[in-house]
Image (spheres, rainbow, N blue to C red):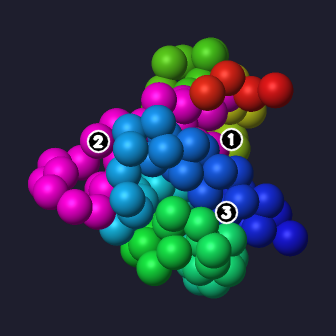
Amino acid sequence: MHEMSVALAVVEQVEEAARAAGAAGVRQVRLQVGELAGVVPDALHFCFELACAGTLLEGAELVAEPVSARARCDACGAEWATGMPPQLCCPRCDAPAAGLLCGRELHIAGVRWHEDVKHAVPVPVPEEG
Ligand SMILES: [Zn+2]
């Protein structure tokens, strides 16, 4: 299940950052989820809860922030929201989209620790691999 591997990766990254920060636990994780990231929010919430069990994130709330997908046309320079299912041909000149500007992201946008840290702390995201 795609959502499970995403949830496990998020939990791993946040737990690492929590340990580095000396946090006793994690209250909330905000995740930017692109419209075309291929993740079902309900399934992600379910998997997140499972992935958190027994970690510093146990009981943490996952807040998914949807990111609309946008595409761009090289031929005429138009930009548009692709919607879902995605419209990948230019609405102005009908050329195929040159690429997506956004909409595939799965980024940790912020984390709230337990204890007296009141503001969201950005998490340094380690390089892949
Ligand atoms: Zn165009």
Q: Residue at x 29, y 63 (%)?
A: 114
Q: Is residue 129 left or right of residue 123?
A: right
Amino acid marked by disc 1: Cys
Q: Position of residue 83 (x, y in %)?
A: 55, 58
Nearest the eye: 123 or 73? 123
**Secondary structure type for disc 3:** helix
Q: Is residue 4 left or right of residue 80?
A: right
Q: Residue at x 22, y 61 (%)?
A: 115
Distance in Å between CA atoms under marks 1 and 2: 39 Å
Q: Position of residue 84 (x, y in %)?
A: 61, 64
Above or below for 6 versus 43: above
Residue 40 can be seen, yes or no: no
Q: Quadrant of the C terminus?
A: top right
Q: Earlier in the sequence, mark 3 or mark 1?
A: 3
Q: Nearer the viewer, mark 3 or mark 1?
A: 3
Determine which quarter of the picture holds residue 75. Answer: top right
Q: Which mark is residue 121?
A: 2
Which residue bears the numbered disc 1? 89
User: Are the residues at dot 2 and dot 3 in contact (C-beta closer than 8 Å)?
Assistant: no
Q: Quadrant of the N terminus?
A: bottom right
Q: Which residues are magenta?
A: 99-125
**Secondary structure type for disc 2:** loop
User: Are the residues at dot 3 and dot 1 in contact (C-beta closer than 8 Å)?
Assistant: no
Q: Which mark is residue 7?
A: 3
Amino acid marked by disc 2: Val
Q: Nearer the viewer, mark 2 or mark 3?
A: 2
Above or below for 40 versus 5: below
Nearest the eye: 70 or 96? 70
